[in-house]
Image (spheres, grey):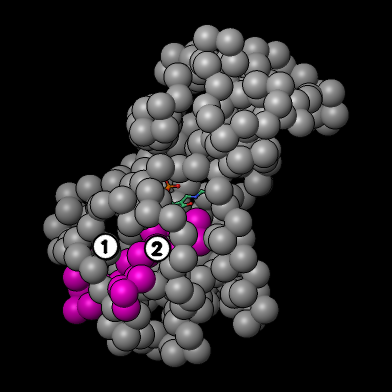
Amino acid sequence: MRTVYVNGEYLPENEAKVSIFDRGFLMADGVYEVTSVLGGKLIDFDGHAVRLERSLKELDMAPACTKEELLAIHRELVAKNEITDGLVYLQITRGAPGDRDFAFPDPDTTPSTIVLFTQSKPGLANSPAAKVGMKVISIPDIRWHRRDIKTVQLLYPSMGKMMAKKAGCDDAWMIEDGFVTEGTSNNAYIVKNGKIITRELSNDILHGITRAAVLRFAKEAQMEVEERNFTIEEAKEADEAFVTSASSFVMPVVEIDGVTLGDGTPGSVAPRLREIYLEESLKKAI
Ligand code: PDD
């Protein structure tokens, strides 16, 4: 049985409890992070910790603990659960004021709730899906306009995932004003004539930690990168496409709305970026 972390305690998962008045449960008033683990080590931990701090600040939530404490909890859970490859999920909510009220509770009397758990995914970096690539559909992006904050409001992304499944596909790319924003739980890219194109950072998308690293590695490898909006039509005419996230690293996309990209294989840029990302991130894993 897994050991999980709740508000300062390490507990067996069936003994961990959160109040029914928790604002995460009642109002999706909470933020989260997902950090991958490879070879028992955390990938891009610093980036996730910095983004968490920003998400909390944007929502006027007090940091539940320091970065050092967070790192220690992550490591302890990885060790206790003997995770070689997998993920650490972290969630911080505005706590449980003991009743339902739209107004935020006083943080002095209502401490935030902090929960962490691990997910074991043996062979996470060798996913067979990376060899064949994913199929995506496009759907309208009807989410709120602060997608840069990593909140636990994931109902629409979950619905998007289900729409994709129903269509026999793996994921959905969301479209706003004709332009692709991002995938349900990843950042989206296309490749045309060797150039990597991805939407620029704004409140319209999550500022992916994997995105930042991948773009840095791509530039270091002298690959051309352009951060700009692209339409779904442009994507369908791209040579390649891919997504990035902490759980999928770099994952090729071979089909969009039934249109095959290139020769229908992952191509060369995405697999190369995946290799570089995994190699370089492993070197810095902690
Ligand atoms: N999702 N965009 C969205 C909407 C996301 O939910 C995610 C991550 C990303 C990629 O961010 P990063 O590279 O920092 O993981 C982009 C996580 C993995 C999840 O919800 O499980």
178 part of magenta stretch: yes
Q: Is mark 2 within 8 Å of ligand 1?
A: yes
User: For numbered disc 1, what is the local secondary structure?
Assistant: loop
**Residue located 76% across and 31% down the image:** 20
The part of the image, by quadrant, that contains residue 67 is top left
- Which amino acid type is shown beneath numbered disc 2? Glu
Q: Which residue is mark 2?
A: 182
State the image coordinates of residue 181 (x, y, percent, origin top left): 36, 65
Examine the rendered structure and indicate whether residue 225 appears above or below residue 6: below
> Which residue: 40% across, 63% down?
182
- Position above or below: 124 against 37: below
Under circle 2, the secondary element is strand
Q: Main secondary structure of the magenta part?
A: strand
Q: Is residue 173 left or right of residue 5?
A: left
The span picked out in magenta is 176-196
Dot 1, how many residues are within 10 Å of its Cα: few (below 14), some (14-19), or many (20+)?
many
Q: Is residue 232 magenta?
A: no
**Cβ atoms at labels 2 and 1 below 8 Å apart:** yes
Q: Is residue 143 above or below residue 116?
A: below
Mark 2 or mark 1: name the one nearer the start of the chain: 2
Ligand 1 has an atom within 8 Å of the beta carbon of the residue at disc 1: no
Percent across and percent down for residue 19 are 75, 26
Judging depth in this view, the residue of 114 and 215 nearest the camera is 114
- The residue at 39%/58% (across/down) is 187
Marking on residue 199: 1
Of residue 265 and residue 147, the one placed in the foreground of this image is 147
Three-letter amino acid code at disc 1?
Arg
Quick check: can you spot residue 230? Answer: yes
